[in-house]
Image (tube, rainbow, N blue to C red):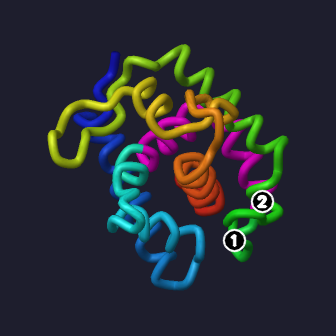
Amino acid sequence: MTNWTTDIGFRLALARLGGAIVASGRLGLIDARSIRWRASGGANLQGHANTLVPLSLLLAMTDKTLVRRVRRDTDLTRDMGRGSVESLNKSLRDDIGVAMSNLRSTQGSDIVAQEIKSKRNITVNKACDTYLSIAMGGSHARGGAGDTVVKRTLKIIAQFNMV
């Protein structure tokens, strides 16, 4: 088990990703703005961003093939919002789900984040079960805000060559 919240390299990569999300959001990138909105408490979804941005980074760091696929199949000028071509790309979603399931099987007990208030550790397995749909490697019958945060974060990581 690795505690990624104390790994300096991971923390620096996460800070770099956070900076890219903030900067690109200010420049009007809708996917980044969506993540920032959640992180700031929009619809009380701050836990999603707090947990799933680092989880997405860990996934990208462990599966470069997935990152290349996301880079190829997404475009920064397009919004990955509900009903968009990118969000409805079942093949891409399935590949992300398989990669997330693989991450769970190899690093499920790794600590990827901490709860905002209590500072309790959140493992890869806990993050997936709490926020993601079955299709994305989690436990919820239907997707939603969690799936969106992962897909949008992976898109930003891939398009900005962050891993």
- Image quadrant where one finds the N terminus: top left
12 or 2, which is in the foreground? 2
Q: Which residues are magenta?
A: 52-74
In the rendered image, the vertical position of residue 45 relative to residue 22, given as above or below: above
Residue at the far front in the pictured view: 141
Asked which quadrant contains residue 51, the reply is top left
Residue at label 2? Answer: 86
Asked which quadrant contains residue 92, the reply is top right
Q: Residue at x 30, y 45 (%)?
A: 11
Q: Is residue 163 visible?
A: no
Q: Is residue 72 visible?
A: yes
At mark 2, the secondary structure is loop
Residue at label 1? Answer: 79
Q: How many numbered tags mark residues here?
A: 2
Residue 143 is labelled as none
Whether the residues at callouts 2 and 1 have beta carbons within 8 Å, the answer is yes
Residue at the far bottom in the pictured view: 27
Q: Residue at x 74, y 57 (%)?
A: 87
Query: Which residue type does callout 2 highlight?
Result: Glu
- What is the x, y in percent for residue 136? 64, 35
Q: Is residue 1 left or right of residue 94?
A: left
Asked which quadrant contains residue 105, the reply is top right
